[in-house]
Image (spheres, helix red, strand yellow):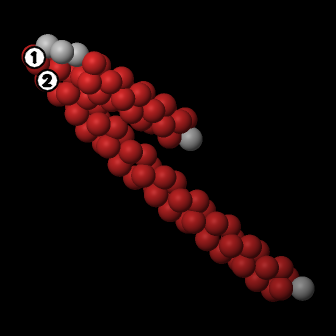
Amino acid sequence: MTTLNQLASAHATALSLHATLSQFALETLDPTIKTMYVEMASGMQVIASGIERRKQQLTTREQFIAQQYAQALEAHAIVQSAEMTETE
């Protein structure tokens, strides 16, 4: 879960930087600086999207692992029940 928390934090930071850089671009009169801010904001948006995709991959993986664990526990319980029945 720590990795997901770190990714969530990085995602929030990237979105915050995107918003800040976009605001700077709106407030800047110099066209060269404005272009620089727009490009940096776009880069932050790309980074945020990549982080979000990775978060989704990890979430899906964790859900799969949890499902497999639950199935293993269920199978173990069935085997134990069968063993108890055999010994009686």
Q: State the count of labels.
A: 2
Query: In the image, 46: left or right of 59?
Result: left
* CB atoms of marks 1 and 2 within 8 Å: yes
Say which residue appears at 71% left-offset and 77% top-offset.
79
Quadrant of residue 23 in the image?
top left
Say which residue appears at 41% left-offset and 28% top-offset.
16
Q: Nearer the viewer, residue 71 or 52?
A: 52
- Which residue in the structure is indicated by mark 1? 32
Q: How far across and down, in percent of the image, does residue 86 sit?
A: 81, 86
Quadrant showing the C terminus: bottom right
Q: Secondary structure at mark 1?
A: helix
Q: How far across and down, in percent of the image, does residue 76 sit?
A: 69, 71
Q: In the rendered image of this protein, does residue 62 appear above or below residue 41?
A: below
Say which residue appears at 53% left-offset and 36% top-offset.
5
Q: Residue furthest right?
A: 88
Q: Nearer the viewer, residue 76 or 50?
A: 50
Residue 22 circle label: none
- Which residue in the structure is indicated by mark 2? 35
Q: How far across and down, in percent of the image, does residue 50 sit?
A: 30, 42
- Three-letter code for the amino acid on which mark 2 is drawn: Thr
CA distance for labels 1 and 2: 5 Å
Residue 47 seen in render: yes
Query: In the image, 63: left or right of 43?
Result: right
